[in-house]
Amino acid sequence: MSLRTILLALALVPCLALVALGATNSAQLYEDWRTVHDRNESAKGFGAPLLGVFADLQAERRLSAAVLADPKADRSELTRQRRLTDKSVQSLQALSGSTPAALAEQFRRLDQGLRKLSDYRGAMDKRSATQQQTFDDYTGIIASDMAVFEDFSNVGFGQQSILARPALDAQWGLEMISREDAIITSGVASGHLTGAQRLQLAGVIGAQEHIYDDKVLPQLPAARAKIYQGVLSGTDWKQKTGIEQNLLDTGNADAAGRTPVSAGVGAEWQQSLAGITPRLVQARSAYSADLVAATEGELDRLMTNMMVNAAVSTTAVLLMLFISLRLTGILRRRIFALRSEALELQTRLPDLVERLRRGENVDPDAELPEIRYGDDELGQLGQALNQARSTSLETAVREVELYRGFERLLQRIARRTQLLIGMQLKRLGEMQRRHEDPEVLEGLFDLDHLAARLRRYEENLVILGNGQPQRRWRRPVLLLDVMRSAQGEVQDYRRIRIDTDGETWLSERAVGPMVHVLAELMENAVSFSRPPTPVEVTASQVGRGVAIEIEDRGMGMTPEQYAEANALMADPPRMDVMSRADDARLGLYVVARLSANLGLRVELRPSSFGGTRVVVLVPGELISSGGPLPEELPTGATPVFPDQFALHSVDRTGQPGRPPAPRAQSHPGDQEAFTRPLIGPWIEPTPRPAPAAPTPGPNPLPRRVRQASLATELREPPPAYTEAPRTGPAGDRPLPRRTGARSGATVGAFQRQSRTARLRPDGDPRTDHQPIHPAPGPDRTRKEDGR
């Protein structure tokens, strides 16, 4: 389960338990209230019919006893009483359908007795039943009626049951008086009481005294007991007691044991009962009303308790739910905050490491503050994360220091190697100036070409070590020269065909990186295409700058490889030299790094020949509005034109071949200008030491020296010559070989210099041909190699 589920379970389980407990308690209280309420309502509904049947049966029993004792007695009153009894019984039986289930058994017994009442009456009318039997039959029905009344009086409250006991006993007291009345009435009708009747009368009188003296008076409240005390001590009660004593006195009995009862005694008896019975019924009714009010109050209290319990339970549940959810929310927020801190640490730690790799001064405590969450379990977890943070940071710092040290070591080794390569190139240049043998020169030129390629590879190491190439230019350079210089750094450069659209000058800060980028891309194109298929390199002006396209005719790549390469060009990652030691795409990575620094846009796409086409978009800010301003030439210098640019010239057979070899030169300065030209106007620099220069004639035509217009860093050794160089008329300067194919740039340069020489008037200081740049020497070589 998730943490949210666990926390919700911890919060909801106690709440649900409390809800169940409160609901159970409230249900129990409601059930008790409903039971008591139903009993109370049932008592109210059945009370009056039960008491009516009770009183009517007592009256009918007394009259039946009188009729049985005196056959000549008037039966009209008994008949009327029977009708009243039947009406009361019908009223009670009409309520049988609403009898509570707990009282159904008692009510069934009463109903059975009431249904036998007609049989009892028939037996009495036929005089087939004795007087005592009739008395017992009516007494049994009245007892069943009292049992039902007692059950209805028990509403379910213990205290109310105790309080209802005196009222029930008082009702039994009235029953005892009614039984005594039936016995005495029978004696008055017959004129005497038998010994059995006298004994029965004594038992009833004793039961009365026990009920009132021992049950009713002690248990009633003082106010209600005082009423009963007034009745029991009144004149009517004393008169009743005197009659009872006379009837029970055995001295008045005859020989047969019968006690005579006169009509006067009967009248006195009825007079005393008329003063006692109503007062006892009134006292019982008043106390019953008190019981009903107490029961109603108890029901109201029970309802109040139920409502209070439900309210308290609901409040407790809501409060517990609120507290649980609140605490759960606090705990979740703390956990989520701790998780957020951990995620922020995960996010900021790589950025901090990257900043450390860039050499920035970083305060780890300020950048990655410690996580503080108290001293509880979450605080301990935060302390553990702090320890993990410290360990990760220390490890990252050590890794960064190790990586930066490795980069510095790589750059140092590459710089030293570049220094040696620069010295090698200088030495090769000196050897080229000393030798005139074509075969020796061919070998020297090949070595110079290999050294130039090796210099580019060493620059790759510098770039991989997060460094920058050391070759710098101070003036704009023709894009065509940059492309040819890049072509000269490729092994199989004869297969590369260059074509440009117009004359475009490249900003000085972009010359070195552009040469490197184009050389890497040209070499990739040559390496991954089958010889002797050509590699087409074209440059043309576009709306946002200059587009250079390099197209080969190799096998190409898969769409996934194109997408991966373009992603690398769009966003080059930081180079991990150790992890990419076996990666064959280091050249592409170097191109991506240099392109990102310059703002170039490099895209690889399938070629129409089945190979790969690379489009390099040079932004407009890297394009210069024009070339370098013209400067005065030194005295004695002769303008020359480069011929080394036509690296992809075609020989007479139509196959790509080497460019024409230069003529033998008469002094080292000429050879230096040939092998390491400057980028700018094509001139012959002043040699050191300067030999005697030939005196120029009027309007001299410019003479070219190979690679004189290229910068030192762009100069490449020419290939070997296929024939001996021709010498000029003076015999001290080699003449270039005439070829059928000549670069348009060469012809254009020749025309510009010719036009300049023709338009100059005699005596113009610029006819002295002062050099724009000093001739390359040892100092320039050292600057080139990073010293």
Image (tube, rainbow, N blue to C red):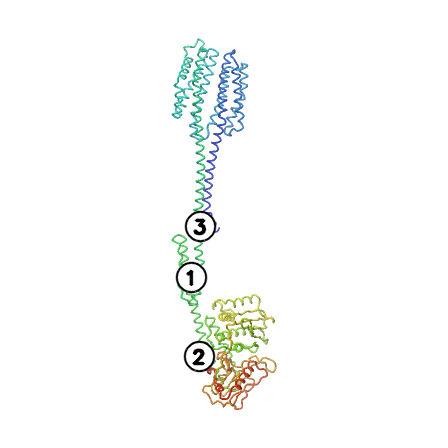
Q: Earlier in the sequence, mark 2 or mark 3?
A: 3
Q: Please name the residue shown 45% across and 58% down the image.
A: 343
Amino acid type shown at disc 1: Ser
* Of the two numbered discs 2 and 3 in the rendering, the one whose residue sits closer to the viewer: 3
In three-dimensional space, the C-alpha distance between marks 2 and 3, rounded to whole angstroms, equals 71 Å
Cβ–Cβ under 8 Å for marks 2 and 1: no
**Pointer 3: what residue?**
329
Q: Nearer the viewer, residue 684 or 61?
A: 684
**Pointer 2: what residue?**
782
Q: Is residue 287 above or below residue 614?
A: above
- What x and y, as percent, mark residue 53? 50, 22
Q: Is residue 375 above or below residue 736?
A: above
209 left or right, relative to 701: left
Mark 3 element type: helix
Mark 1 element type: helix
Q: Which mark is residue 392?
A: 1
Q: Which mark is residue 308?
A: none
Q: Nearer the viewer, residue 665 or 399?
A: 665
Q: Earlier in the sequence, mark 2 or mark 1?
A: 1
In three-dimensional space, the C-alpha distance between marks 3 and 1, rounded to whole angstroms, equals 31 Å
Amino acid type shown at disc 3: Gly
Cβ–Cβ under 8 Å for marks 3 and 1: no
Mark 2 element type: helix
Number of numbered tags placed on the structure image: 3
- What x and y, as percent, mark residue 125? 54, 15
